[in-house]
Image (cartoon, rainbow, N blue to C red):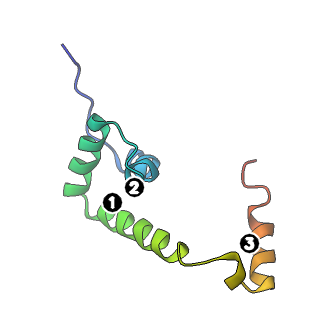
């Protein structure tokens, strides 16, 4: 007998959104994700924002950044893993 996982929380959905968008979720987690966004307007909006961000960033290239913008980004993300 397989135990059913409880519904996703909003916090769990945020942690899974990258895998969801990349099509990397297991089928059971994908169903839980889809079920959650079907009933949660806030998470649907978050997912839409993430898709828009990815679409926009996909159009950027290093060559299109002003030197000062590149410098600022590098400074902000230098220690992001700490």
Measured as percent of width and height from the top left, residue 75 is found at 81, 68
What residue do we see at 64% from left, 77% from top?
Answer: 61
Measured as percent of width and height from the top left, residue 32 is found at 26, 42
Lower sequence index among marks 3 and 2: 2
Lower sequence index among marks 1 and 3: 1
Circle 2 sits on which residue? 21
What residue do we see at 75% from left, 86% from top?
Answer: 66
Circle 1 sits on which residue? 43
What residue do we see at 33% from left, 60% from top?
Answer: 43
Compared with residue 63, is residue 35 higher up or lower down, i.e. above or below?
Answer: above
Q: Residues within 10 Å of mark 3 (few under 14, many from 20)?
A: few
Q: What's the CA distance linking mark 1 and mark 3?
A: 27 Å
Q: Residues within 10 Å of mark 2 (few under 14, many from 20)?
A: few
Circle 3 sits on which residue? 73
Q: Nearer the viewer, mark 1 or mark 2?
A: 2
Lower sequence index among marks 1 and 2: 2
């Amino acid at each position: 007998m397989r135990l059913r996982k409880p519904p996703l929380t909003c916090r769990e959905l945020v942690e899974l959104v990258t895998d969801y968008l990349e099509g990397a979720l297991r089928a059971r987690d994908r169903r839980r994700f889809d079920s959650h966004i079907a009933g949660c307007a806030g998470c649907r909006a978050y997912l839409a924002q993430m898709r828009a961000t990815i679409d926009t960033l996909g159009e950027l290239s290093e060559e299109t950044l002003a030197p000062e913008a590149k410098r600022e980004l590098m400074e902000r993300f230098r220690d992001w893993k700490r």
